[in-house]
Image (spheres, rainbow, N blue to C red):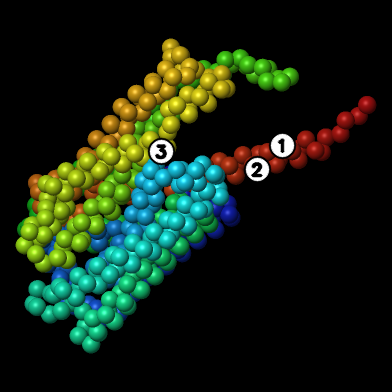
Amino acid sequence: MLSTFKNAFKIEELRNRIIFTLLMLFVFRIGAHIPTPGIDSSSLSAFFSQQKAEGSILTFFDMFSGGALQRLTVFALGIMPYISASIILQLMTVVFPYLERLSREGEAGRRKITMYTRYGTVILAVLQGFGIAVGLQSMSAPDGSPLVATHMSPWGFKMMTVITLTAGTSFLMWIGEQVSERGVGNGISLIIFAGIVTDIPTAAINSIRQVQGGNLTFLALAVVLGLMIAVILAVIVMETATRKIPVQYAKRTQGNKVYAGQTSHLPLKINSSGVIPPIFASSILAFPATITGFINVPWVQAISSQLGPTAFLYNMLYIMMIFFFCFFYTAIQYNPVKIADEMKKYGGYIPGIRPGQKTAEFLNHVLTRLTFGGAIYLSLVSVLPILLIRAMNVPFYFGGTALLIVVGVGLDTVRQMEAFLLNRNYDGFMRKTKKRTGTRTLKI
């Protein structure tokens, strides 16, 4: 990994891509400190301090926005509306034939789906922004002071908050797309990555203060750090692990050319869905948790308490959604029937398995087992913070989904850099070969 970063800065194009990515993330961090107009910052800080003590869902999702939600800045909604819109579009692709046809039309179809996703992001941002504005007007700090400045009119504050938060989310969506196109890595994932990483120093300082204050023993902190290192290693192993299915290609003739038989393999990842299921599950659970938290009715508040990150109902729904999205996303990525037909078309077969329907059934069986194992792995890693909070009273949420996202996004970014370096070296080798071949002269 260190050699990859060292070699990356030797190539001008890749160096420019890395610098562009860092500049965009720097812009994201600046926006995370620009407050929304009409908010009493001291009352809001006191309110979130109380929420942290109670283990509120707002504290959990504030981690993914890099503290922007706690300060209610222009990026308070983060990139979650975009992720939610992507979920809805992917689900609708399976249901509506029109969207399914668009997904098969190549680049033109993907552009239309991207356009619909942008529209959906704006709509969801408007709804969430309006809900946050209404909730802030009905809440108060522990000392009874309102969170909204008294000089703001009710509807003026609502409109200002909706416009500000929607514009912030739209700008973040644009930053993510620009990073994906002109930078290194997936822009949306890197924004979430940056939001999580910025909380690590604060979490470390808080842990040290807990030890100094006697609320957390040094042994418990050492156990937590050791467990985090072990989980990081386990995540790296699981994210890079693949099941290689051997594929044999028979000798075939195409036109005047004869192709000899070859032996290859079909790589199937244990966790083919990556960090998508935990992110999707978190974003979906944010809707009912946020809405019920703003309604001051006893039975609604009872439901809201069960949708907190430490509640049993929340974790059960969280695990169920992780399993669902693991199988759903794998089904979108891999079609056993299509893979079997392609193998049969080019004379490929799996040793011991008949081509065609039997091959599709075998691939479906293998994918089901791999996906089930990957879903168990994602669920165990995702509920890790809950176990730490209950067993050792750990004062921060870094772990589980956050740790999975940080490691997964980091590995994916390094892979893209390595692929760029490999492609660059290959192109350079081909140019040198052509140059040497072109200098030769044939004498008769």
Q: Which amino acid is tagged 3?
A: Ile
Tell me if label 3 and label 1 are in contact, CB under 8 Å. no
* Contact (Cβ within 8 Å) of mark 1 with mark 2: no
- Viewer-side label of 3, 1: 3
CA gap, disc 3 and disc 1: 41 Å
Residue of label 2: 428
Query: Residue 385's x, y, as percent?
Result: 18, 48
Looking at the image, which residue sits at the far top? 352
Name the amino acid type tagged 2: Gly
Q: What element carries label 3?
A: helix
**What is the crowding at mark 2: few (fewer than 14 residues within 10 Å), some, or many (at least 20)?**
few
Q: In this view, does 147 lie to the left or right of 87?
A: left
In the displayed orientation, state which residue is furthest to the right: 444
Mark 2 vs mark 3, CA separation in Å: 36 Å
Residue placed farthest to the front in the image? Answer: 97
Q: Residue 433 carries which label?
A: 1
Query: With respect to residue 407, does 239 lie above or below?
Result: above
Crowding around mark 1 (Cα neighbors within 10 Å: few <14, some 14 to 19, many 20+) is few
Nearer the observer, 334 or 382? 334
